[in-house]
Image: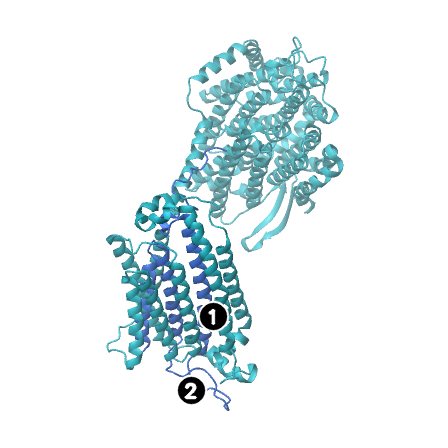
């Protein structure tokens, strides 16, 4: 029974991003009032979602889909049932308040526009996450929340603690996101290509039978546990308190950290119900609950206290999903809503206190009841809901969760004890935040205390009223919100019996609540002693999760450094070895693999006498260069092989090439001789024998490879289509008889133009290099080391180092600059001679 | 005759790579110069060799008469020779300036960009 296929559902998750795009602009025009203006978007979404409550409570749902990657059957599909609606309402409702609140809270901050944009983007990702039907879309939104929360947590990026908290959140939740991706892909493969969350719930039983079920389960649990800060991934959440208070209120009441709970709830029909599911969830949830609750007692910073109780609450929600009975799921939904309301309230009040007094330390505050009466009342209401006192909605959350554990087995009793202990400790935290800053004698604070303005107080006010109203009219709440949400978690309709009646206070189960309250009251009066005791325990430990995380991150950096140093060792000859070994392999390997090593010629090629002499000349030039004892011999040998190459061009029908080669070789030898006479170099190659052997073999392998490659190339017929084209069109189209020149100046004229530009650029660069005054920066890292080796030749120089150097430089400057224009010119001159196409011939 | 040239080209590559693997800048420069020649000859030979007949249409004729040398590789090589020369000159001056500034011609001692004792990356956030 789907409601109309309304595409506007997709708009819900897009609108916040559009608003985020405009936020900085709106901030520029409206200043801190931008919060009020921008709150229209989440408020609109909230109002849009309200009419869905009734049809969805009657068992209907909304489904809509856009084409995304149709080739893979992936659509951007959305789905609204009880669970997503409850989450979407919480996100957009609390989001509205947060946007308004941040407008005031960050008033005067120059990056406020950016902040509002981040908040809206985060809200958009969160809405997309809970509305997504397609699992790929779910993953994308999941990672988007990780990225946007990174931006939010690291908003005070000038503080190292903020940066660390942001990176920690990103690494942990982003890593969990990767596990989610693998889990999604595995599950999609196992179920034969189902991408939709609404469809996979049909496969629950079948999935449990499959061999990969535990793997998929673990992957999804890692994703949920990292996001929802379950032990042992819990430590990023309290650190994320580095974020501005509105962020903490938003991330830790109904959004970011609840995403993991949402995933577990969503997957309950598919992955849940098995023994391993419930044992894992209950045990990890219990550890997290106790850990968070105990840690909360240790804190004095209000935000830290709240963060730790958030960890505890998340553990509690996970336990309830793990129990998985109808009553447990009902309790879970009530607790989810109650927690979102009171936790958002508390964070915002903590922000008001911080804003109004300048401190968040609970031991430094007192006696504010007269100065901040409204905050006091609202904190009391939040604490009532947190403690599970009637008539707030928190009362039913606690009643139902105890009810779900009234079984006669050991497991239930242990969990029950855990829940009572956890609840009692959380009650203490709630009570101390609601009472300690307000009662007692007034303590001096950094700022003169003042009540929060409307933008700040409106949130706790509305949440407080809502917490009371939803508790008082529990029958209505139960029917409209709780029951449909619980039903979509369990996939069968769950009715609940929530209502007020007098006899409920006479039932024995109320005793469990009384025990909780009594225990809480006892702890409350002994809180200072307990805190002191817990802190003294803490000193005994050298290790905590943060230190472990740092170690992990720094190891990663060290590892990256090691890898970089291994590959980028800074020794050029080793880089060159890698390059040429690769060349040798690239040339020879295909020949061997394809069995294409060319047959060696059996007879000596029949060449004329003068052809042999030219080839021999080139060979002599090459070998002379290797064995040359002096610079001059090496330069002359370079000239010999160059001239031999020019002669080869001449012999095989390329007079233009030969001519250019002659020119270039002359210039090369002249310039080289000029520059070399200014250098004081080692005479000999100073390679040791092993290096000579290594370099020689690499060079030989490459050379032989090139020879073999060329031999095998010339054994096949050549494709002469281009040559024929040029030969045929050169005269009729380009009116030139020298085809080489026609190609250069006509067919590939632009290419030649580029070539001239390159030569010119090189000429200018050479000029610039020579004209830079030497002796600017003298960083002699290499200089000091290499000196001894050259001492013999450099000793006279070194005595009057700077002076001699300057003279040497200035001389060179004159000489080489004299040479340069000539070279550039002569090359230019050489071109027209070659390219007087047809005219001469 | 391509075979004979193929062996010669192999020699060009061997010598140039051997020189390039040396640590002395000036030897590497010589290697670059030779490598350029080797590559040019490689392209030239791969386009097949024709003896002594340049691809020029004689006056009074409308087209080339077979056989003629392949003009396409020649055009490519002509560009390559000039560019190669520009590169060589630039490298030569660069090497010379490096020698002046760093007082070194051994690449092992030219460690300005990648110093031997580079600071470790900061271990913080």
Q: Contact (CB < 8 A) between labels 2 and 1?
A: no
Please report the residue visible at 28 percent of the width from the left and 69 percent of the height from the top.
A620
Chain under disc 2: B
Image coordinates for residue A299, horizontal then vertical, percent: 54, 18
Compared to residue A198, the image places residue A543 above or below, namely above
The verdict on a common chain for dots 2 and 1 is: yes
Please report the residue visible at 26 percent of the width from the left and 56 percent of the height from the top.
A692
What number is the disc on residue A486?
none
Tell me which corner region of the image, top left, top right, bottom left or bottom right, holds residue A588: bottom left
Q: Quadrant of the N terminus of chain A?
A: top right
Compared to residue A675, the image places residue A200 above or below, namely above
Q: Closest to the observer: A416 or A299? A: A299
Q: Which chain is blue?
A: B
Q: Earlier in the sequence, mark 2 or mark 1?
A: 2
Tell me which corner region of the image, top left, top right, bottom left or bottom right, holds residue B20: bottom left
Which is more foreground, mark 2 or mark 1? 1
What number is the disc on residue B79?
1
Query: What residue sits right under mark 2 in the picture?
Result: B66
Image coordinates for residue A534, horizontal then vertical, percent: 48, 15
Q: Which chain is cyan?
A: A
Q: Is residue A612 visible?
A: yes
Chain under disc 1: B
């Amino acid at each position: 029974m789907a409601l109309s296929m309304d595409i506007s559902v997709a708009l819900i998750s897009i609108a916040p991003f559009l608003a985020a795009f405009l936020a900085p602009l709106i901030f520029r025009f409206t200043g801190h009032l931008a919060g009020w203006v921008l709150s229209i978007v989440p408020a609109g979404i909230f109002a849009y979602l309200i009419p869905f409550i009734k049809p969805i409570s009657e068992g209907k749902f909304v489904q809509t889909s856009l084409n995304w990657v149709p080739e893979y059957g992936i659509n951007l599909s959305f789905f609204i049932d009880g669970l997503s609606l409850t989450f979407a309402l919480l996100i957009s409702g609390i989001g509205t308040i947060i946007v308004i609140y941040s407008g005031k809270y960050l008033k005067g901050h120059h990056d406020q526009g950016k902040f509002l944009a981040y908040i809206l983007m985060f809200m958009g990702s969160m809405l997309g996450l809970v509305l997504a039907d397609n699992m790929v879309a779910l993953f994308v939104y999941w990672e988007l929340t990780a990225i946007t929360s990174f931006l939010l947590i690291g908003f005070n990026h000038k503080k190292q603690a903020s940066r660390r908290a942001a990176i920690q959140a990103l690494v942990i939740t982003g890593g969990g996101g990767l596990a989610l991706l693998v889990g999604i892909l595995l599950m999609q493969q196992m179920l034969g290509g189902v991408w939709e969350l609404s469809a996979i719930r049909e496969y629950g039983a079948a999935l449990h039978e499959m061999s990969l079920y535990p793997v998929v389960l673990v992957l999804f649990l890692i994703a949920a546990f990292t996001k929802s800060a379950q032990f042992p991934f819990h430590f990023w959440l309290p650190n994320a308190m580095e974020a501005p208070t509105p962020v903490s209120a938003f991330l830790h009441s109904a959004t970011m950290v609840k995403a993991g709970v949402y995933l577990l709830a969503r997957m309950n029909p598919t992955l849940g119900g098995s023994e391993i599911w419930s044992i894992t969830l209950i045990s990890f949830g219990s550890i997290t609950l106790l850990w968070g609750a105990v840690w909360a007692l240790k804190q004095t910073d209000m935000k830290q206290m709240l963060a730790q109780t958030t960890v505890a609450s998340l553990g509690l929600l996970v336990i309830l999903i793990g129990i998985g009975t109808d009553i447990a799921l009902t309790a879970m939904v009530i607790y989810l809503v109650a927690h979102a309301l009171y936790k958002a309230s508390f964070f915002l009040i903590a922000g008001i206190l911080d804003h109004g007094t300048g401190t968040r330390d609970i031991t430094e505050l007192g006696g504010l009841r007269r100065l901040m009466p409204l905050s006091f009342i609202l904190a009391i209401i939040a604490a009532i809901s947190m403690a599970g006192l009637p008539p707030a909605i928190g009362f039913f959350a606690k009643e139902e969760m105890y009810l779900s554990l009234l079984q006669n087995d050991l497991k239930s009793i242990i969990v029950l004890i855990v829940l009572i202990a956890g609840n009692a400790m959380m009650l203490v935290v709630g009570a101390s935040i609601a009472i300690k800053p307000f009662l007692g004698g007034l303590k001096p604070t950094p700022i003169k205390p003042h009540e929060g303005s409307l933008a700040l107080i409106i949130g706790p006010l509305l949440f407080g009223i809502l917490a009371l109203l939803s508790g008082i009219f529990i029958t209505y709440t139960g029917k409209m919100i709780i029951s449909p949400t619980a039903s979509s978690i369990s996939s069968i309709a769950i009715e609940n019996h929530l209502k007020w009646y007098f006899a409920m206070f006479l039932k024995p189960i109320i005793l469990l609540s009384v025990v909780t309250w009594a225990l809480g009251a006892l702890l409350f009066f002994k809180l200072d002693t307990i805190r002191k005791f817990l802190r003294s325990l803490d000193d005994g430990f050298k290790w905590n999760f943060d230190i472990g995380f740092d170690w992990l991150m720094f190891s990663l950096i060290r590892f990256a450094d090691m890898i970089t140093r291994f590959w980028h060792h800074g020794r050029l000859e080793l880089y060159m070895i890698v390059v040429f070994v690769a060349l040798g392999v690239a040339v020879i390997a295909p020949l061997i693999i394809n069995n294409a090593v060319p047959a060696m010629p059996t007879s000596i090629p029949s060449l004329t006498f003068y052809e042999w002499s030219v080839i021999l000349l080139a060979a002599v030039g090459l070998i002379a260069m290797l064995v040359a004892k002096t610079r001059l011999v090496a330069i002359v040998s370079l000239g010999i092989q160059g001239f031999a190459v020019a002669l080869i061009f001449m012999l095989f029908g390329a007079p233009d090439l030969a001519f250019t080669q002659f020119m270039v070789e002359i210039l090369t030898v002249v310039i080289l001789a000029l520059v070399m006479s200014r250098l004081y170099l080692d005479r000999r190659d100073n390679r040791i024998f092993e290096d000579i052997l290594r370099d020689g073999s690499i060079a030989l392998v490459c050379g032989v490879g090139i020879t073999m490659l060329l031999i095998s190339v010339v054994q096949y017929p050549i494709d002469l289509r281009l040559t024929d084209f040029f030969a045929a069109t050169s005269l009729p189209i380009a009116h030139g008889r020298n085809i080489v020149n026609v190609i250069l100046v006509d067919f590939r004229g632009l290419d030649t133009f580029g070539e001239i530009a390159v030569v010119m650029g090189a000429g200018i660069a050479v000029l610039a290099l020579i004209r830079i005054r030497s002796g600017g920066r003298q960083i002699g890292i290499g200089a000091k080391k290499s000196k001894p080796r050259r001492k013999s030749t450099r000793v006279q120089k070194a005595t009057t180092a700077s002076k001699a150097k300057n003279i040497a430089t200035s001389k060179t400057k004159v000489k080489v600059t004299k040479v340069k224009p000539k070279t550039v010119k002569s090359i230019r001159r050489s071109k027209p001679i070659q390219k007087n196409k047809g005219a001469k011939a | 005759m391509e075979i004979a040239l193929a062996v010669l080209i192999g020699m060009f590559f061997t010598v140039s790579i051997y020189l390039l693997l040396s640590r002395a800048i000036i030897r590497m420069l010589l290697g670059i110069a030779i490598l350029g020649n080797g590559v040019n000859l490689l392209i030239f030979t791969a386009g097949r060799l024709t003896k002594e007949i340049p691809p020029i249409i004689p006056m009074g004729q409308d087209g080339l008469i077979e056989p003629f040398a392949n003009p396409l590789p020649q055009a490519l090589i002509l560009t390559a020779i000039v560019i190669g020369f520009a590169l060589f000159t630039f490298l030569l001056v660069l090497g010379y300036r490096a020698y002046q500034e760093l007082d070194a011609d051994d690449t092992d001692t030219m460690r300005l960009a990648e110093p031997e004792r580079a600071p470790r990356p900061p271990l913080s956030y």
